[in-house]
Image (cartoon, helix red, strand yellow):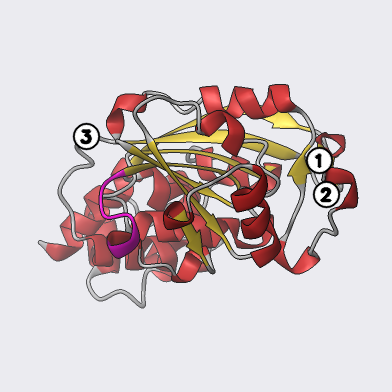
Amino acid sequence: MRNHFQHNKAFGQHFLRSDDTALQIVEALQPLNLANNILEIGPGLGVLTQHLKKIPEKKLFVSEVDRRIIELLKSEQHFPESQILEGDFLKLNLKTLVGEPFLLIGNFPYNISSQILFKMLDNLELVPLMVGMFQKEMALRVVAKHGNKDYGVISVLVQVYYDCEYLFELEPIAFDPPPKVHSAVIRLKRKSDPGHFNPILLKSVVKAGFNQRRKKLSNALSPVPGAKEAAICLNFADKRAEQLSVQDFILLSNSIEN
């Protein structure tokens, strides 16, 4: 099946070659007791799916936009049609379609990987754990700590809610067809208590700070009312956004609101 499948570039299809690697990714989906359901994004030819189906007492859903793959899942893996979420994952109503919390996993299409993360954040009460394959550059950005050149908006907004782990890397040859970039698998585990803050304000502060990341915060935060004054009070005014930790951003946000 793999040798005859015509990959669709528009869907960012790069399928894992190694069954051992697929099993390694599935085994990283721990702890399993955080949810009764699993949702795989982009099952492709089922290299992850075949292992996920074997996890006991878990209901597996798959999200797939390619009708050809959906037909293969039903015919060759005998996958239940009621557990196939057909369509663009970014447009799915997860609260309606799945309802209960789920463990999120997938070899994510790299062209929408950041959007998948923001979709996860929009549904964070449903996603206690995520294990995903990303372009290496994106994976490094997600897990980056303050002071690192990779640290940015997505680093802060994900790390506010999730503890992040960088698990392992894969070379292009691990995929069919090989992408032009290296890949990496990361795990995100939702924090039991991210703290108290205004999420809308925090997002505005983070985006403003990194929108002009070379400028000092006293200037970069000028679009956010009260932010410059709060930054001065906290001795953050002469710092740049990448120098502030996740907790610093929460502190700044709360100071603005108060």
Q: Going by the image, does 241 lie left or right of 50?
A: left
Q: Residue at x 28, y 61 (%)?
A: 95
| Tag 1 and tag 3, C-beta contact below 8 Å | no
Where are the magenta residues, as a range? Answer: 96-101
In this rendering, which labeled residue sits more in front, label 1 or label 3?
A: 1
Q: State the SS at label 2.
A: loop
Residue drawn 34% across the image and 28% down it: 57
Alpha-carbon span between mark 3 and mark 2: 36 Å
Q: Is residue 52 left or right of residue 193?
A: right
Q: Residues within 10 Å of mark 2 (few under 14, many from 20)?
A: some
Label 1 sits on a secondary structure element that is strand
Amino acid at dot 3 = Ser
Specify whether residue 200 is in view: yes
Say which amino acid is labelled 2: Pro
* Residue annotated with mark 3: 192
Predominant SS along the magenta part: loop
Where does residue 216 sit, x and y in percent of width and height? 46, 60
Quickly name the residue at label 2: 179
Front residue of 232 and 186: 186
Q: Which disc number belongs to residue 175? A: 1
Query: Which kind of residue does numbered mark 1 sit on?
Result: Phe
Name above or below for residue 184 compared with residue 210.
above
Q: Position of residue 86 (x, y in %)?
A: 52, 65
- Labels 1 & 2 near each other (Cβ < 8 A): yes
Quarter of the image for residue 163 reads top left
Classed neighbour count for the residue bearing mark 1: other residues with Cα under 10 Å, few (<14), some (14–19), many (≥20): some
Residue 128 placement: quadrant: top left
Count of numbered circles in the view: 3
Report if the CB atoms under discs 3 and 2 are less than 8 Å apart: no
Discs 1/2, front:
1
